[in-house]
Image: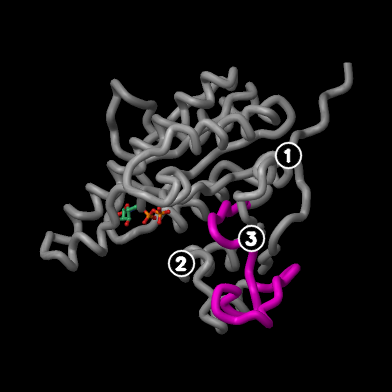
């Protein structure tokens, strides 16, 4: 028998603010909606997810308030694990087999990050959610997106944004003339100081030929559409 054609493999980034529905903590209705959109295509696309944690804690903010930066960053990473578990729960409820892998060992809660095992899970149709960032202070979950996407061989990074549906020529909230860009390069984004992803992450994508699509997740069904390859939002290329 002929070998089935390779499926598309993508890495979806969900920042913490997406989980909180705009406030601190996890908004179950929002996460359920996201999970259902992923589960709808889990048998057609190989999906891994990097979750942020800004809805709980950001290390930089805690350190400004007087905490040791590294410890604050570990608190930030633990926040991402809560989001990862919430997402896993709603994915499983939607019938989508899911594994969480964390960069900090917590055997009762999740598997450790084992890249080849993550690939195997995806090949078997499981969604893999990466929690605890890189397990290292002074990193961001954006950088983890670039690293994990490269290591597990994802075709591209899909950045879900709330409040904006792509990259604009100017801030669309303040400039009525701002226009959404179809495409731009990491070099342009870096020079124009576009903060759609942090600079370390963009440099890593650029240096390693990784494409990224930035899209708005407000519109119902958008996550499903980009997972299937629809060209929403803005494509960022090396
Ligand atoms: N963090 C970290 N190392 C990592 C990933 C995350 O120290 O590899 C910490 C950092 O303090 C960060 C917090 O976890 O502020 C939450 O992650 P992030 O801010 O990237 O989440 P997002 O902005 O996507 O919600």
Image location (x, y in percent) of residue 90 = 49, 26
| Residue at mark 3 | 165
Residue 8: assigned label: 1
Q: Residue at x 54, y 59 (%)?
A: 163
Q: What is the distance, in whole Å, between disc 3 and disc 2 at their CAs?
A: 18 Å
Image position of 143 (left or right of 191): left
User: How many angstroms separate mark 1 from mark 3 (CA)?
Assistant: 23 Å
Applied colour scheme:
one colour
Dominant secondary structure of the magenta stretch? loop
Element on which disc 1 rests: loop
Q: Nearer the viewer, mark 3 or mark 2?
A: 3
Front-most of 88 and 55? Answer: 55
Quadrant of the rendering where the N terminus is positioned? top right
Residue extending farthest right? 1
Disc 2 or 1, which lies upstream in sequence? 1
Instruction: Give the extent of the magenta segment.
Output: 157-185
Q: Residues within 10 Å of mark 2 (few under 14, many from 20)?
A: some
Question: Of 225 and 118, which appears nearest the observer?
Answer: 225
Q: Earlier in the sequence, mark 3 or mark 2?
A: 3
124, 226: nearer the viewer: 226
Residue highlighted by disc 2: 198
Reply yes or no: does residue 162 show up in magenta.
yes
């Amino acid at each position: 028998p002929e070998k089935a054609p390779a499926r598309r493999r993508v890495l979806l980034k969900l920042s913490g603010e997406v989980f909180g529905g705009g406030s601190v903590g996890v908004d179950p209705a929002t996460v359920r909606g996201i999970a259902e959109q992923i589960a709808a295509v889990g048998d057609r696309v190989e999906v891994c997810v990097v979750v942020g944690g800004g809805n709980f804690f950001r290390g930089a903010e805690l350190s400004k308030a007087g905490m040791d930066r590294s410890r604050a960053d570990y608190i930030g990473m633990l926040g991402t694990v809560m989001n990862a578990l919430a997402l896993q729960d709603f994915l499983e409820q939607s019938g989508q087999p899911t594994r969480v892998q964390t960069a900090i060992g917590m055997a009762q809660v999740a598997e450790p990050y084992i890249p080849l095992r993550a690939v195997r899970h995806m090949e078997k149709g499981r969604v893999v959610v990466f929690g605890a960032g890189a397990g290292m202070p002074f990193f961001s979950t954006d950088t983890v997106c670039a690293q994990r996407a490269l290591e597990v061989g994802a075709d591209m990074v899909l950045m879900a944004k709330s409040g904006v549906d792509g990259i604009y020529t100017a801030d669309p909230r303040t400039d009525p003339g701002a226009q959404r860009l179809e495409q731009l390069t990491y070099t342009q984004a870096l020079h124009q100081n576009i903060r759609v992803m942090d600079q370390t992450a963009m440099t890593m994508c650029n240096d390693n030929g990784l494409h990224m699509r930035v899209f708005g997740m407000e519109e119902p069904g958008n996550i499903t559409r980009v997972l299937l390859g629809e060209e929403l939002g803005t494509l960022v290329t090396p």
